[in-house]
Image: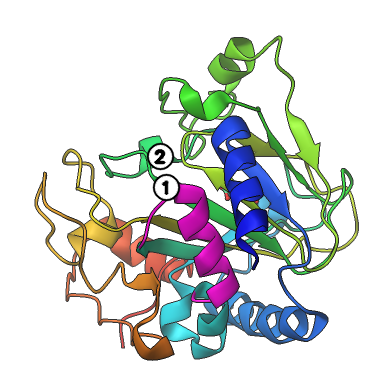
Amino acid sequence: MKQEALDRYAEAFRRDGFVQVPGVLTADELARYGAAVDEAVTTRKAGDTRRLDEKTPYEQSFLQCQYIWEDFPGVRGLTFHPKIGELTAALLGASKVRLWHDQALYKEAGGRETEAHQDQPYWPIAERDTATVWIPFAATSDATGCMGYIPGSHHDEADFVDIFNTPGDSSRLRERYADRPPVYVHCEPGDVIFHHGFTTHMAKANRSGDTRRVYTAIYFADGSHRHGERAHPSVDRDAIPVGGVIDGGATPVTWPLEGGRIPEPEPWPDAAGLEWRERAERLGIIPKRA
Ligand SMILES: O=C(O)CCC(=O)C(=O)O
C-alpha cells in the first residue's frame, strides 16, 4: 500500500480509535478464507447442539472460536496476511507486530447485540499499542450485526465491563458516552475495520436470517510487557512473568514475516484438570488437545 494511504489511515486511527479500510481482500481471498473459517467453526462447535435460546446471553451474541489459525492451517494466510500486517504496523506506529490471538465471531441469525465494551481490560498487556482487525466475509449492515465505535474513546480510562457473565454491565459505558453516539460502520465485501484496544465498541443484533460470519485477529507492538496476574493463555502458555516481554510462541510475529514464512503454531502445554480449559475445549473455544 502507498505510504500516503498508510499515513492517512494511521491518522484516522490515532484520532478516532478505529478506521475502515476498503478493498483489502479480494473476492477470491474472501471465498477461500471464509470457507476455512467456516470449517473451523463447524468442526469446533460440532459438539454444541444447544439452540440459541438455550445459551447464555454472552453466547447469544456470537459463536466464538479462538486460536483457529493453530488447528486450521487454511486460516493462516489470513492471520498473517501481509496487507493486514503492513496496515497494523502503520496504525500502531510499530516496526514489528505480534499476534495476541485470533477468533471467529459468528453472530447467528437472531443473535443478540454485542454489548459495549473495551477489549484491553481483558488482556494482561501493559502498553496501549494494540489493534484488532475485524474481517467480515460478506457485507454487513444494521440488520446483520454491524459494528459501532465511540470516536475518540480510546483516549479514555479503562473500565472492565463483564460482558461474559453480567448482562447490562455495559450501562456504565453507555452513560459515559451518553452525548457521544457510536458510529455504526457498514462494510462491503473485502473491507476490514481496525479498532484500538481501548476503543469502546459494540455490535447490533443480527435480525437477518443468515449468520454474520466474521474473523478477527488482535495484534500488539513487539516489545510489549505482561501487566498483572490476570490469567490469559496468550501469556500463560509461554509462562511470561509479570513485567516480562511478551515474546513466546503463542504470540508470533506477524509483521514483518521473516523470509515471508508463516510460523508453525506451538503446542499447548499439558494442563489437564484446569476447569476453564476443559470447558473451553468442550465448547470449541480453544483447540482440543491432540
Ligand atoms: O463482532 C462482534 O460482535 C464483536 C466484536 C468485538 O467485540 C471485537 O472484535 O472486539
Give, as a three-letter code, the residue at label 2. Answer: Gln
Disc 1 target residue? 130
- CB at mark 1 closer than 8 A to ligand 1? no
Residue 111: give x, y in percent of width and height. 75, 49
The quarter of the picture where the N terminus appears is: bottom right
Tell me if mark 1 has few (under 14), some (14-19) or many (20+) residues whose alpha carbon lies within 10 angstroms of its own: many
Task: Mark 1 and mark 2 in contact? Answer it, CB < 8 Å.
Answer: yes
- Determine whether 49 is above or below 156 in the image: below
Q: How many marks?
A: 2
Q: Amino acid at mark 1?
A: Thr
Residue 247 in the image: state x and y as whole percent: 21, 64
Residue 69 shown left or right of residue 263 in the figure: right
Considering the image in quadrants, where does the C terminus appear?
bottom left
Residue 15, numbered label: none
Residue that appears at 19% across and 59% down? 236
Dot 1 falls on a residue whose secondary structure is: strand
Taking 124 as reference, is 211 left or right? right
In terms of image quadrants, where is residue 228? top left
The figure's colour scheme reads rainbow
Whole-percent x and y of residue 61? 66, 47
Tell whether position 247 is magenta: no
Magenta part mainly helix, strand or loop?
helix
Looking at the image, tell me whether mark 1 or mark 2 is earlier in sequence order. 2
Q: CA distance from mark 1 to mark 2?
A: 8 Å
Return the residue at label 2.
Answer: 120
Q: Is residue 84 covered in magenta?
A: yes
Q: What residue do we see at 28% from left, 44% from top? A: 125
